Image: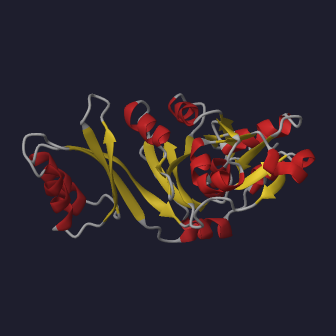
Amino acid sequence: MVKTAFLGPWGSFTEAAARTLVPNDELIPYKTIPDSMDAVKEGEVTRAVVPMENAIEGSVNITLDYFIHHQRLNMGGEVSAPIEQHLLIHADHLDNWKDVKTVYSHPQAIAQCHQFLRKNLPDTDIHYTNSTAEAAKYIAEHPEESAAAIANEVAAEAYSLTLAETSINDYPNNQTRFMLLTNGDEVFTKEELGDTPYKTTLMIGLSSDFSGALHQVLAAFAWRKINLTKIESRPTKTGLGNYFFIVDVDKKYDDVLLPAACEELKALGCEVQVLGSYPVFSWDHLKKNGKGKTVKEVI
């Protein structure tokens, strides 16, 4: 059976995404996102599912930076999952949940629920954890502590916690992009879903020799009518003001258009790397066709 790493412990959003994307794999939880990526490179697992971007908070920087600077893997597939945050509490504290002294969760989850926390728990201390599931696990293991966790319903079930408040994220259309990372060049396919749209991710370093470099980059795609779904600057970590761009192209890396655009950019003095060309799966279609085990069946 194929082994797939995910950000644990059991009950995390990443686990839910992995169960939907690769329902027949043996899932292995890891403490951090870099740990799960290292496991792929070192051969402990075949692939890993990692969060890449949230609709509210933007890119998951730890994933992107570790991928770019430390552990370059192949992007083998993507799925965007709906994210709904809840306030979880031990049943003993349900009647006075507004008096809790501490809230535990992942930094992204805390940020996604900022307004709820300001309004309802303005005086609580915030403790960051490696994942929302880790926060839920901590609450379950410390029932004596006046504390709550922000996590999902799967984590509540996994650790027998009570939902004090549901859907507490500040914006209703909360989604996270999850990426399947592999060692080789292969992409993940699901023949039962039929034709699947593709996306290509490029890393572009701008030439500093002339002004208007970014305009030239965009023009290389524009006149070829290549649609860009995302463009984001990231620091090169070589000094202030030094950046490269991550560009998502709404197109498979083909034999003509994208290679020609990349060659044009190189001719302008830009550094261009193809980080991956991969299928983008629909969450609803995967849920409809998937038959993965539930959390209760594996913990």
Q: Residue at x 60, y 36 (%)?
A: 45
* 102 lies above or below 54: above
Extreme front residue here? Answer: 123
Q: Quadrant of residue 218?
A: bottom left
Residue 291 appears in the picture as rendered: yes
Residue 161 appears in the picture as rendered: no
* 189 lies above or below 273: below
Extreme right residue here? Answer: 92
* 199 lies above or below 125: below
Q: Residue at x 56, y 60 (%)?
A: 175
Q: Residue at x 58, y 69 (%)?
A: 192
Does 158 sit left or right of 207 as displayed? Answer: right
Q: Quadrant of residue 50?
A: top right
Q: Position of residue 43 (x, y in %)?
A: 55, 31
Does 183 sit left or right of 93 as displayed? Answer: left
Q: How many callouts does the rendering have?
A: 0
Q: Position of residue 257 (x, y in %)?
A: 21, 63
Q: Name the quadrant of the N terminus.
A: top right
Closer to the camera in the image, 34 or 197 = 34
Q: Position of residue 215 (x, y in %)?
A: 15, 57
Does 157 sit left or right of 92 as displayed? Answer: left
Closer to the camera in the image, 264 or 236 = 236
Closer to the camera in the image, 90 or 19 = 90
Q: Position of residue 111 (x, y in %)?
A: 57, 49
Q: Name the quadrant of the C terminus.
A: top right
* 15 lies above or below 208: below
Please name the colour scheme applied to the rendered image. Answer: secondary structure
